[in-house]
Amino acid sequence: MIRPMAATAAVALLLAACGSPELVPPSAAPEGPVTTPPPVSAPAVDDNTLTAEGFGPLRIGMSRAEVVSALGEDSNPGAVGGPEPEACDQWRPARAPDGLLVMVQDGTLTRISVSEPSTLKTDRGFGVGDPATSIKAAYGSSAVAEPHKYVAAPAEDIFVWTKGGPASAGSYVEEAGARGIRYEINGEGRVNMVHVGGPAIQLVEGCS
């Protein structure tokens, strides 16, 4: 009879002779195609936002006929928009938001302006009623402040040119392709009007 201890020894010798089976690590899961996440892009500008290039369907540089096609004819044709309407006229298209005026010079859209009761904002989030201090802080050195022509400080005009700005502070921009935003600040230090477009944003009395 084989004793238990002898049997155990015999089994151990047998396994040693045959060789221990190698431990094979589990194979790694097959790798799928490596995909690169798309780059994070800046949020698109809302169509109802004022930019130096225009507002909604209106683009600075389009013809009067295109303005009419986009937002309608003059909502108040009896009003005088300029001393020489054929050369320069300012009016509100029938389907435009309240408080919005377009300026058309020699048949071309050159400026868009908003005032009360407009709630429209620029692409930096500023509109009628916002403080000048916030605008200057947001734009930094890009904001050029100039004294208001008729009202004492804190009234002023804050210009932000995105294309073709002035060579020096206070100089008049004449380049037709220039584009910018003018925040007109009242005597309380808040935005009274916003003008966007070309060199016409510098005009302080409508068409003059």
Image (tube, rainbow, N blue to C red):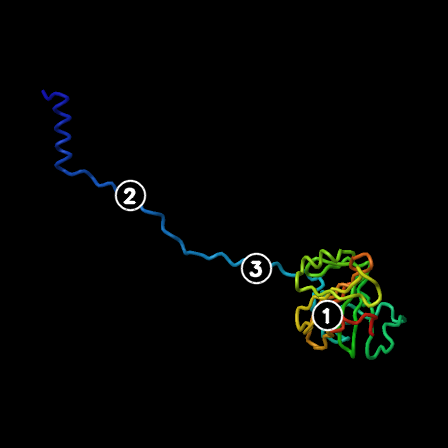
Q: Nearer the viewer, residue 146 or 124?
A: 146
Numbered circle sitting on residue 64: none
Which callout, 1 or 2, points at the residue further toward the start of the chain? 2
* Residue at mark 3 to residue at mark 1: CA–CA distance: 26 Å
Q: Is residue 162 found left or right of 4 in the rendered image?
A: right
Numbered circle sitting on residue 41: 3
Which callout, 3 or 1, points at the residue further toward the start of the chain? 3
What's the residue type where badge 3 is placed? Ser
Q: Residues within 10 Å of mark 3 (few under 14, many from 20)?
A: few
Q: Residue at x 40, y 53 (%)?
A: 32
The image quarter in which residue 130 lies: bottom right
* Residue at mark 1 to residue at mark 2: CA–CA distance: 69 Å
Q: Nearer the viewer, residue 10 or 207?
A: 207
What's the residue type where badge 2 is placed? Pro
Name the residue tied to disc 2.
Answer: 25
The reply to whether callout 3 and callout 1 are in contact (CB within 8 Å) is no
Q: Residues within 10 Å of mark 2 (few under 14, many from 20)?
A: few
Name the residue tied to disc 1.
Answer: 197
SS at mark 2 in the image: loop
Q: Is residue 193 found left or right of 2 in the rendered image?
A: right
Q: Residue at x 45, y 57 (%)?
A: 35
SS at mark 1 in the image: strand
Q: Which quadrant of the figure contains the C terminus?
A: bottom right
Q: Where residue 60 sits: x, y (%)? A: 72, 72
Q: Residue at x 36, y 51 (%)?
A: 30
Q: From what the image shows, is residue 4 above or below residue 106?
A: above
What's the residue type where badge 1 is placed? Gly
* Residue at mark 2 to residue at mark 3: CA–CA distance: 44 Å
SS at mark 3 in the image: loop
Q: Which quadrant of the figure contains the N terminus?
A: top left
The image quarter in which residue 201 lies: bottom right
Depth-wise, is mark 3 or mark 1 nearer the camera? 1
